[in-house]
Image: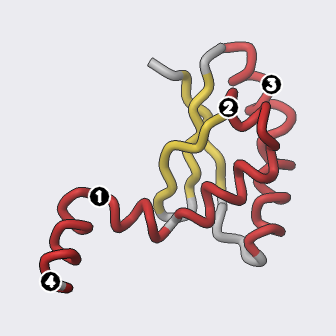
Amino acid sequence: MGDALKVFLSESGLGAKLRDWDVHQAWRETLGPVLCKRARSVLYRRGELVVEVESAAHKQELESFTAEGYRQQANRRLGTDRIQRVTIKLKR
């Protein structure tokens, strides 16, 4: 049973998502309940947190002014510098 679960988690991609759950949680807690709906973390891989936004204006604001501060705060919540960079993408 344990081996079957490992294979399922690996093949489905859920294993990586569960492993990095704390990164996404730190991002959500840092932004708070309202802002995290507008800037949703969708992927964490090799130090990069990919955040999805719905408007070009919000993308510009995050890239120019606030993403670095949020990254630092999220890392403080994690107690480590796991998030090395934040990439902002428009939702398609």
For this view, does 17 lie left or right of residue 42? left
Please, what is the three-letter code of the amino acid marked with disc 2? Lys
Callout 1: SS:
loop
- The residue nearer to you, when weighing 24 against 58, is 24
| Residue placed under numbered mark 1 in the picture | 13
- At x 74%, y 14%, the residue is 57
Image coords of residue 81 (percent x, y): 72, 71
Instruction: Relative to 21, say whether 85 is above or below.
Output: above
Callout 2: SS:
helix
Q: Do the residues labelled 2 and 3 touch (CB within 8 Å)?
A: no
- At x 74%, y 32%, the residue is 63
| Farthest-out residue, bottom | 2
Nearer the viewer's eye, disc 2 or disc 3?
A: 2
- The residue nearer to you, when weighing 22 against 55, is 22
| Neighbours of disc 1 within 10 Å: few (<14), some (14-19), many (20+) | few
Image coords of residue 60 (percent x, y): 74, 22
- Mark 1 vs mark 2, CA separation in Å: 23 Å
Earlier in the chain: of badge 1 and badge 2, it is 1
Instruction: Relative to 78, say whether 1 is above or below.
Output: below
Nearer the viewer's eye, disc 2 or disc 4?
A: 4
- Mark 4 vs mark 3, CA separation in Å: 48 Å
Earlier in the chain: of badge 2 and badge 3, it is 2
Q: Name the quarter where the C terminus is drawn.
A: top left
- The residue nearer to you, when weighing 67 against 10, is 10
Nearer the viewer's eye, disc 4 or disc 3?
A: 4
| Residue placed under numbered mark 3 in the picture | 61
Earlier in the chain: of badge 4 and badge 1, it is 4
Instruction: Relative to 34, say whether 81 is above or below.
Output: below
| Neighbours of disc 4 within 10 Å: few (<14), some (14-19), many (20+) | few
Image coords of residue 80 (percent x, y): 73, 76
| Neighbours of disc 3 within 10 Å: few (<14), some (14-19), many (20+) | few
Residue 1 has which mark?
Answer: 4
